[in-house]
Image (spheres, rainbow, N blue to C red):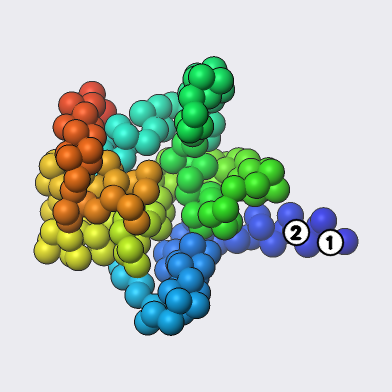
Amino acid sequence: MLAIFFFASTILAVITFRFLPVYFTPLMVIRSAQQISKGEKPVLHHHWVSGEHISKNLKRAVIASEDQRFYDHWGFDVGQIKKAVKENNRRRKPRGASTISQQTAKNVFLWPRSSWVRKGLEFYFTVLVEVFWSKDRILEVYLNSIETGDGIYGAEAVAKDHFHTTAENLTRKQSAVIAATLPNPIRFNSKHPSPYIRRRQKQILRQMRYIHLPEE
């Protein structure tokens, strides 16, 4: 009975978010709780915008930096997974191979701390979003739910807070520097980028030239 309830409720949730904006994610709640536990006032900047109001520059930038085969795979990039496994045998710090679909599933339905349980659920929800959502919807939700700074979530909030513009009007350089910080947007700041982030920005700008969106 519990299994039936789990599958029915999770599938219903995924189908619901195919159409409705995602205004809150587990990470937003966790970060707010962490701020309160430190005696701080919780800060949460998040403004949902539809995909057509998000700059193509930002779409190209995150695909270039996070998942260059996003529109070609079915949720998991097997080639990148194999490459990461091989490289991690020699690396001190493990290299991830999560796709945008996997990150979206984690951001919307799960918690950030990694574990085998979460990895299993991440696989399950990734399959569901790939089945029930279009690629454009996955990218739209991803760009609205990602952590983009301390208390800042999504494209519109970071555009306003860091660049005094809108998600729709982000330039190539602004988009690339936002994408450069995504591996750790608390440590790295797109408003005041470090030399390392500037180097990452230049790399992403070069890669963006080879990213073509379906509508183009």
Locate residue 57, reporting x and y percent. Answer: 19, 42
Circle 1 packing at 10 Å, graded few (<14), some (14-19), many (20+), is: few
Q: Please, is residue 214 above or below residue 57 in the view? A: above
Residue 169 seen in render: yes
Mark 2 sits on what residue? 6
User: Quadrant where the C terminus lies?
Assistant: top left
- SS assignment at label 2: helix
- Cβ atoms at labels 1 and 2 below 8 Å apart: yes
Front residue of this view, candidates 117 and 124: 117
Which residue, as the protein is rendered here, is positioned at the far right? 1
Residue in the image at 39% along x and 33% along y: 67
Distance from disc 1 to disc 2, alpha carbons, whole Å, reads 6 Å
Locate residue 156, reporting x and y percent. Answer: 25, 61
- Numbered label attached to residue 77: none
Locate residue 201, reporting x and y percent. Answer: 20, 37
Amino acid of disc 1? Leu
**Number of marks present in the image shown:** 2
Amino acid of disc 2? Phe
Q: Is residue 9 left or right of residue 131?
A: right
Q: Please, is residue 70 above or below residue 128 in the view? A: above
Mark 1 sits on what residue? 2
Front residue of this view, candidates 137 and 44: 44
Locate residue 130, reporting x and y percent. Answer: 54, 41
Q: Is residue 77 left or right of residue 52?
A: right
Q: Is residue 180 left or right of residue 146?
A: left
Residue in the image at 87% along x and 61% along y: 1
Residue in the image at 48% along x and 41% along y: 101
- SS assignment at label 1: helix
Circle 2 packing at 10 Å, graded few (<14), some (14-19), many (20+), is: few
Residue in the image at 56% along x and 20% along y: 89
Q: Quadrant of residue 153?
A: bottom left
